[in-house]
Image (cartoon, rainbow, N blue to C red):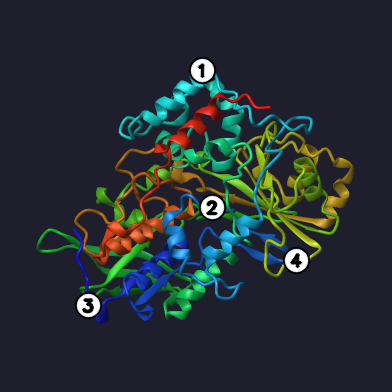
């Protein structure tokens, strides 16, 4: 039950969370809801907007980003719709969408060395290594209903041999799925990205931004919002939403509680005001290490994005079950690392030599026998706008940081940046150049306790609807709200949720929201997927 709001002059919007979902919400309120920016306020607990799409640093001290986002031009329907109307910051008279499109026409990804073996040999990644049983199980999973897969793990749907295939190694290190994650989410990915199955060995269907996502996406959106007069309350934590039942049985947010500069405040809402809040966070409680110091788990206090969700969901089943996603950190964390090399560039050159490629045309390389399951990549350089010519940036991650390293005999989670570089040199078989690497390269590791928490097994009620049934002015967005058919751990999921929330709460025509593409129903896609399953490679 939502209320159509038509009086712009007495309408305010309060957005909780300054990640890309919150920024997209403000964008759709302005462009499609015709709301003046001065009536929109974004609350963000950090100093910097952008959420998980963060990136920072300089050529002297090194660059850092918690994650790297892959895009896909045939999908990401709502994202492209937004970016077509966001001006680029680096190119005059073009949109961010045009800028990304032009970049990907010039720099086409085509990986030659997606999987590397124990002796630095390039494995035949075109051979998926499927057994007949694996193929049948994949088809059965896609054909299953989400109700049937409720609370099921992926490893309940396949034999153990499936998880030793090249396909699974490439899949898990591309999308970050683990065997204990949700079968529902795997099924959604298999359907949503079926058109890219035949590219899984070289990732040629992946699209990137000219620079890191913070500078290429977040900053232009921020500039758009600032130019339209949006209010930003940084270093401000929203702690609770006071929800009351109305005479007609509907529910409404009546006030918003927040902390700013160590002072508690209560903001009372007017009748036509709306609240759109990001619930949960993949990167909450992140811990950053350094070249000499390993990151430490930061779990003394539950992050604000999670605590807010727990507060509003208490006693309200319709607002979801946050505990389902945060109760098992050992199953939801992994570790990323950012590498900055100054002169020499041993690892980058070794990477490009193996892949027979150049930065911009390559992406991810996985050491299949790495006990940490290391995957890292070389983006197009420069990856940061202020990056000097003699400085190169790489980024990677390890899905099994609890394991003892092949060379550094300790869990990755306990390793400093220099120890991670040492392990990388071992896999590249360039230990004779280790001293040079350590002198000319900075590695910054980052532990993220909840980075794949959105993949944890769930049932069909654990996520709240974007606008919960019976609520008049509340929207819930982010990676933990429910969007039918779409896939979490993507920028698109956050942007689509924002558009749905705005259209629902403002009474706009939701039929105009781009539909989730159904490439899985295209004959060509089905044929290519079948050929991929049967392929032994060359």
| Residue bearing the label numbered 4 | 59
| Residue 248 circle label | none
**SS category of the residue bearing label 4:** loop
Instruction: For residue 257, say whether it is visible.
Output: yes
Q: In x, y percent, where is residue 432?
A: 89, 42
The correct choice, above or below, for 389 with respect to 111 in the image is below
Visible residue check, residue 47: no
Alpha-carbon span between mark 1 and mark 4: 51 Å
Q: Nearer the viewer, mark 3 or mark 4?
A: 3
Mark before the other along the chain sequence, 3 or 4: 3
Q: Which residue is mark 2?
A: 71
Mark nearer the N terminus (1 vs 4): 4
Marks 2 and 3, how far apart at CA = 37 Å
Q: Quadrant of the C terminus?
A: top right
Q: Is residue 35 left or right of residue 173?
A: left
Separation of marks 3 and 1 at Cα, in angstroms: 61 Å
| Nearer mark to the viewer, of 2 and 3 | 2
**Relative to 444, does residue 260 appear above or below in the rendering?**
below
Q: Is residue 83 left or right of residue 380?
A: left
Q: Position of residue 144 (x, y in %)?
A: 35, 29
Assess disc 2: are there few (<14), some (14-19) or many (≥20) residues with their C-alpha within 10 Å of its C-alpha: some
Q: Residue furthest left?
A: 247
Report which residue position mark 3 lands on: 7
Which residue does the image show at 64% across and 44% down from the upper left? 413
Label 1: element kind = helix
* 432 or 129, nearer to the observer: 129
Circles 1, 2 touching at the beta carbon (< 8 Å)? no
């Amino acid at each position: 039950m939502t209320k159509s709001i038509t009086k712009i002059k007495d309408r305010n919007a309060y957005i909780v969370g300054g990640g890309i979902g919150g920024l997209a919400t403000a964008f759709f309120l302005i462009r499609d809801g015709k709301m003046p920016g001065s009536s929109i306020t974004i609350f963000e607990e950090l100093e910097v907007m952008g959420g998980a799409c963060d990136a920072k640093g300089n050529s002297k001290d090194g660059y850092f980003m918690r994650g790297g986002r892959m895009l896909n031009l045939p999908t990401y329907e709502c994202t492209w719709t937004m970016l077509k109307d966001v001006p680029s910051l680096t190119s005059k008279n073009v949109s961010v969408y045009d800028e990304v499109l032009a970049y990907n026409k010039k720099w086409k990804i085509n990986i030659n060395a997606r999987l590397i073996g124990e002796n630095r040999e390039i494995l035949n990644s075109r051979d998926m290594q499927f057994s007949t049983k694996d193929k049948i199980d994949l088809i059965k999973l896609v054909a299953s209903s989400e109700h049937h897969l409720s609370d099921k793990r992926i490893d309940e749907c396949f034999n153990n041999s499936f998880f030793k295939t090249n396909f699974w190694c490439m899949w898990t290190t591309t999308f970050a799925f683990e065997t204990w994650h949700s079968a529902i989410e795997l099924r959604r990915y298999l359907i949503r990205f079926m058109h890219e199955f035949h590219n899984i060995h070289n990732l040629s269907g992946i699209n990137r931004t000219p620079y890191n996502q913070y500078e290429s996406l977040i900053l232009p959106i921020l500039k758009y919002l600032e130019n339209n007069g949006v209010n930003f309350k940084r270093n401000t934590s929203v702690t609770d939403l006071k929800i009351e039942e109305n005479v007609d049985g509907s529910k409404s947010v009546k006030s918003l509680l927040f902390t700013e500069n160590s002072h508690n405040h209560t903001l009372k809402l007017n009748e036509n005001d709306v609240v759109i809040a990001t619930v949960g966070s993949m990167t909450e409680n992140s811990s950053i290490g350094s070249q000499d110091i390993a990151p430490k788990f930061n779990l003394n206090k539950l992050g604000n994005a999670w605590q807010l969700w727990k507060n509003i969901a208490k006693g309200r089943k319709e607002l979801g079950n946050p505990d389902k996603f945060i109760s098992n950190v050992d199953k939801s964390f992994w570790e990323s690392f950012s590498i900055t090399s100054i002169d020499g560039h041993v690892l980058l050159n070794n990477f490009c030599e193996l892949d027979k490629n150049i930065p911009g045309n390559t992406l991810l390389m996985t050491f299949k026998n790495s006990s940490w399951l290391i995957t890292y990549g070389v983006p197009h350089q420069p990856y940061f706008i202020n990056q000097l010519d003699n400085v190169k940036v790489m980024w990677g991650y390890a899905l099994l940081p609890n394991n003892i390293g092949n060379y550094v005999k300790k869990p990755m989670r306990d390793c400093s940046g220099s120890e991670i570089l040492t392990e990388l040199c071992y896999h590249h078989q360039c230990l004779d150049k280790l001293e040079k690497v350590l002198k000319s390269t900075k590695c910054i590791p980052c532990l993220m306790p909840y980075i794949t928490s959105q993949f944890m097994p769930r049932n069909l009620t654990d996520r709240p609807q974007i606008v919960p049934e019976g609520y008049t002015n509340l929207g819930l967005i982010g990676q933990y709200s429910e969007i039918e058919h779409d896939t979490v751990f993507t920028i698109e999921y956050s942007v689509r949720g924002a558009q749905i929330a705005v259209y629902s709460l403002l009474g706009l025509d939701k039929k105009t929201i781009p539909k989730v593409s159904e490439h899985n129903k295209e004959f060509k896609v089905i044929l290519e997927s079948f050929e991929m399953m049967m392929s032994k490679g060359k």
